[in-house]
Image (cartoon, helix red, strand yellow):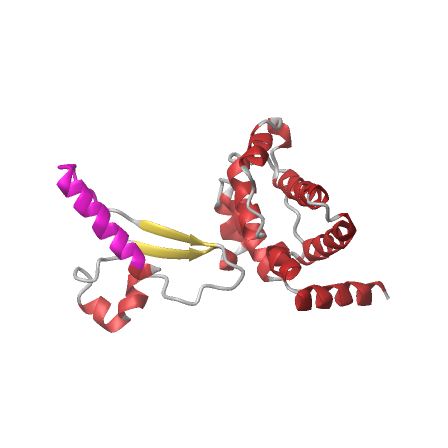
Amino acid sequence: MIGRMLDYKDTQMRRNIEDRKHVLPELDVVLYYGAQSWKGPKTLRELYGARLYDRFPGLCGGNCVVVIDLGVLSSKNRQLLESDLGEVADMVRANREKRDYTGSGKRLQHFVAVTRLLGALSGKPLTRPQLEVLGSMREEDQTMEQAFGFLREQWSRTAYEEGETEGVDMSLKVFHHLEKLGQLSEFSAIMKSRERLAACLREIDSRKN
């Protein structure tokens, strides 16, 4: 990722030069929200190695590219995120720790974009009509809590429309189970795998007994 960002920066600089635009220094920040912790280098210093970087910082590009893993931010740092990113960071952290998270009642500034991100992370991208419904919701209803509720409703409705009435209850059972564990990002993969689905249903039944 760090290497690709350097390529993007070079491409953008060449375009600015070709278009005779004023070239300004840039700081590129990569926000990572995957289910697993970031394993690669987070800075150019880590990419090149401390010995080389500290000796020739100017040749190594300075600190112009940084990767921020939202899942490892402390509670204090997550609270400093005043935008919707704080809510997303809370969700990513909860998912990593496998604990329940259904969102807060705080109004989101970019409700549609955040819900679209949740759908993508869960393996169920939202359609244009669904996005239009989200955009028409009242401002007071545009919360992370409502985003989760909307996704749950849409997934159930899709299953009914596709004639999968027999599997709807099972899908909801799995959905609610993963929701409690804070593992909604695994929903799509589990539903596509017979082995994982069977294992998940066994786990749900064992918790009831």
Residue 14 image position (x, y, % from top left): 17, 47
Residue at left offset 60%, top offset 33%? 142
Q: Is residue 17 magenta?
A: yes
Asked whether residue 181 appears in the rendered view, the answer is yes
On the image, which quarter does residue 205 sit in? bottom right
Residue at left offset 51%, top offset 58%? 71
Asked whether residue 23 appears in the rendered view, the answer is no
Residue 117 image position (x, y, % from top left): 52, 45
- In the image: residue 53, left or right of residue 91: left
On the image, which quarter does residue 144 sit in? top right
Residue 119 image position (x, y, % from top left): 57, 46
Residue span colored magenta: 4-25
- In the image: residue 26, left or right of residue 75: left
Residue 47 image position (x, y, % from top left): 30, 67
Residue at left offset 72%, top offset 45%? 163
- In the image: residue 40, left or right of residue 44: right
Magenta span: chief secondary structure: helix
Q: Residue furthest front?
A: 163
In the image, residue 197 sits, relative to residue 115, either above or below, namely below
Residue at left offset 61%, top offset 56%? 188
